[in-house]
Image (cartoon, rainbow, N blue to C red):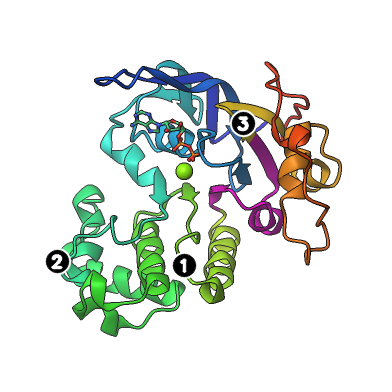
Amino acid sequence: MTTPLLSLKGIGKTYAARGATPAFRALAGIDLTVMPGEALGIVGESGSGKTTLGRIVTAALPPSEGEVLYRGTPYRAPMPLPRRAQVQAVLQDTLGALNPRLSIRRQMLEPFAIHRNVPRAARGARIHEALAEVGLDESVLTRFPGGVSGGQRQRLLIARALLLDPELLVADEPVSALDVSVQAQVMTLLDRLRRERGMAMIFISHDLRVVRQLCDRVAVMNNGRIVEIGPTAEVLEHPTHDYTRALMAALPRDHPRARPSPSPESTTMAQPLRPHRLRSPA
Ligand code: ADP
Ligand code: MG
């Protein structure tokens, strides 16, 4: 049996109280595996804990409970440097991920501060290749982040992540901030890169349609827990959980899978303690 690329065991996260804001339990009892090359979707409405989970996977945030294993070896935030190259993130806020005052060329060179084994002379060529992979012209390198479109910035950030040859890419709502017209292009790009490179991907989205297109398996989150997980087609065609059904029902009517709006009862979802369906990866 292949060792999973990533395993989460009993992960919980409680954000500490701050001032008048009480402590908040954002994740509880998360068990999850990602196999090499697999695309796992994580869906759930805003506030369900998706970003917290993604940040724990990239070791940007330490969990309060449980263990994260990478190829069977536990790791904790902050990760040792080589591991940072193996797990990369692509986020929704492309402007926030870049320094507005530094040229794009400067910022494309930053990964080499982590990946020191790439000789200086070879760095330009690596950047050139990565830009070609995401369909960008080299002329963007002399520009500043504010001088290119949102779609181009996301392509740049994907290219920058690729410079480190990640084995796992965590994409947290990577197209949500982009014009609808370029969303599909960026999604198709991510899908192609994943297949070409045999890279695993965790694709976080509140949009089930996106996940249906890109992911082998999907985990449905509600209130900090995984309430359903399984092969994408099975979960979406035959949702066993009320919450998943409600998410499906929220799809626009013009979509083949569209259903009538959920009744108030079905959107006020009960909270199960265990996932309804647990399957091992295919
Ligand atoms: P999602 O990405 O699904 O919208 P998040 O992981 O961002 O969910 O947030 C889950 C919950 O944790 C939300 O209720 C959010 O308000 C809370 N939360 C997120 N970050 C923090 C933080 N740094 N401190 C306190 N609470 C937080
Ligand atoms: Mg989020």
The quadrant of the rendering that contains the C terminus is: top right
- Tell me: is circle 2 under 8 Å from ligand 2: no
**Where are the magenta residues, as a range?**
199-220
The quadrant of the rendering that contains the N terminus is: top right
Which callout, 3 or 2, points at the residue further toward the start of the chain?
A: 2
Per the image, label 2 sits on a secondary structure element best described as loop
> Is mark 2 in CB contact (under 8 Å) with mark 1?
no
Q: Which residue is mark 2?
A: 102
Give residue 178's mark: 1
What is the CA distance from the residue labelled 2 to the residue labelled 1?
22 Å
> Is mark 3 in CB contact (under 8 Å) with mark 1?
no
Q: Which residue is mark 3?
A: 222
Give residue 280's mark: none
- Residue visible at 21% across and 57% down? 110
- Tell me: is circle 1 under 8 Å from ligand 2: no
Q: Position of residue 118 (x, y in %)?
A: 25, 58
Which callout, 2 or 1, points at the residue further toward the start of the chain?
A: 2
Q: Does residue 211 show up?
A: yes
Mark 1 nearby-residue class (10 Å; few <14, some 14–19, many ≥20): many
Name the amino acid type tagged 3: Asn
Per the image, label 3 sits on a secondary structure element best described as strand
Q: Is residue 189 above or below residue 53?
A: below
Q: Residue 203 lies in magenta, yes or no?
A: yes
